[in-house]
């Protein structure tokens, strides 16, 4: 794992930009893609030596003014700008944070009650490492044929996506889902730096090339909503939108909105109408 995600982001973003993106002439051939360090330093109003220290993780405490100047120089805007600032603030503490023991994750009674009450809408409880902490029968009916519950004692969405032999067969938008889960784990490392089980999970996933190629500092995701496109062993081609309901700081409820799907099987509509 990278010791300083902010430094990684700086290097990656500089490599992504072309001179023309920031109003500079293209010039001749460059040894490496992207902007030169000196070009970014001039645009940000800092020295090239200081930028080098930031990119190498030797300086981990840039001021707010420097963060703003670098964001402007690198054309980082919108949600990416918030992420950039978050990395700058958290990377300093993360690089010094020792490994800490993971907390035992159990669904709170209130969240368990909500998940049960949502039945027959498929719903489950999602923990900080993308581990599924509990679910209702409606979600089990869909998830089990997919292979998600092959090991019901250790259900993890990222581990299933990157390691299960059937994941790519049952997920028609596997690439999109894989990008989203790897980005969500990147965000988790910023929220809980040094947590041992999270680090163990990511270290194990990095042994898989598909995950390693996606482990990028500029990728981040909240997993708030999206669509899962399944080639389901029982129900055929189905598209299931999902929404995330934030619970406490560590746990969320994820709802699969199967009433919005256009399924081949007429029996798949699991959310009953009010008058049924």
Image: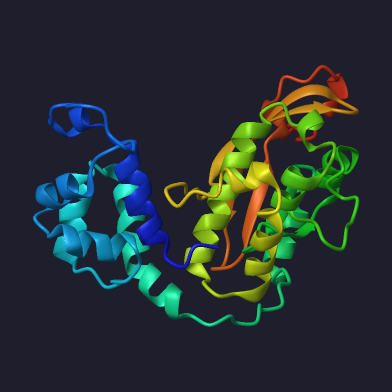
Task: Please provide percent x and percent y for residue 173.
Answer: 66, 29
- Residue 269 shows up from this direction: no
Quadrant (top left, top right, bottom left, bottom right) of the N terminus: bottom right
- Closer-to-camera residue (238/90): 90
Residue 65 to residue 10: above or below: below
Give the tally of numbered discs.
0
Quarter occupied by residue 233? top right
Q: Is 162 displayed left or right of 83 in the figure?
A: right
Task: Tell me which residue sits at (82%, 44%) in the image.
Answer: 164
Task: Tell me which residue sits at (82%, 17%) in the image.
Answer: 264
- Closer-to-camera residue (182/60): 60
- Closer-to-camera residue (258/53): 53
- The residue lying furthest to the top in this view is 264
Chosen colour scheme: rainbow
Task: Please provide percent x and percent y for residue 98.
Answer: 53, 82
Q: Is 84 displayed left or right of 200 in the figure?
A: left
Task: Please provide percent x and percent y for residue 112.
Answer: 74, 64
Task: Please provide percent x and percent y for residue 258.
Answer: 72, 32
- Closer-to-camera residue (249/162): 162
């Amino acid at each position: 794992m990278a010791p300083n995600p902010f430094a990684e982001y700086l290097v990656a973003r500089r490599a992504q930009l072309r001179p023309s993106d920031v109003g500079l002439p293209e010039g001749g051939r460059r040894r490496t893609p992207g902007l030169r360090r000196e070009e970014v330093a001039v645009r940000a109003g800092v020295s090239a030596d200081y930028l080098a220290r930031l990119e190498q993780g030797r300086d981990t405490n840039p001021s707010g003014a420097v963060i703003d100047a670098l964001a402007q120089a690198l054309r980082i805007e919108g949600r990416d700008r918030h992420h950039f600032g978050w990395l700058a603030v958290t990377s300093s503490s993360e690089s010094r944070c020792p490994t800490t023991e993971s907390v035992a994750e159990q669904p709170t009674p209130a969240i368990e009650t909500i998940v049960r009450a949502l039945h027959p809408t498929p719903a489950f409880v999602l923990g900080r490492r993308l581990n599924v902490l509990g679910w209702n029968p409606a979600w089990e009916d869909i998830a089990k044929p997919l292979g998600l519950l092959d090991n019901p004692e250790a259900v993890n969405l990222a581990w299933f996506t990157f390691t299960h032999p059937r994941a790519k067969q049952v997920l028609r938008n596997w690439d999109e889902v894989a990008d989203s889960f790897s980005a969500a784990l990147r965000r988790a490392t910023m929220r809980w730096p040094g947590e041992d089980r999270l680090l163990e999970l990511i270290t194990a996933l990095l042994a898989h090339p598909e995950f390693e190629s996606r482990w990028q500092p500029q990728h981040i995701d909240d997993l708030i909503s999206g669509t899962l496109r399944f080639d389901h062993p029982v129900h055929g081609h189905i598209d299931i939108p999902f929404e995330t309901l934030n619970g406490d700081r560590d746990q969320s409820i994820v709802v699969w909105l199967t009433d919005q799907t256009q399924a081949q099987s007429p029996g798949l509509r699991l959310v009953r109408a009010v008058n049924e």
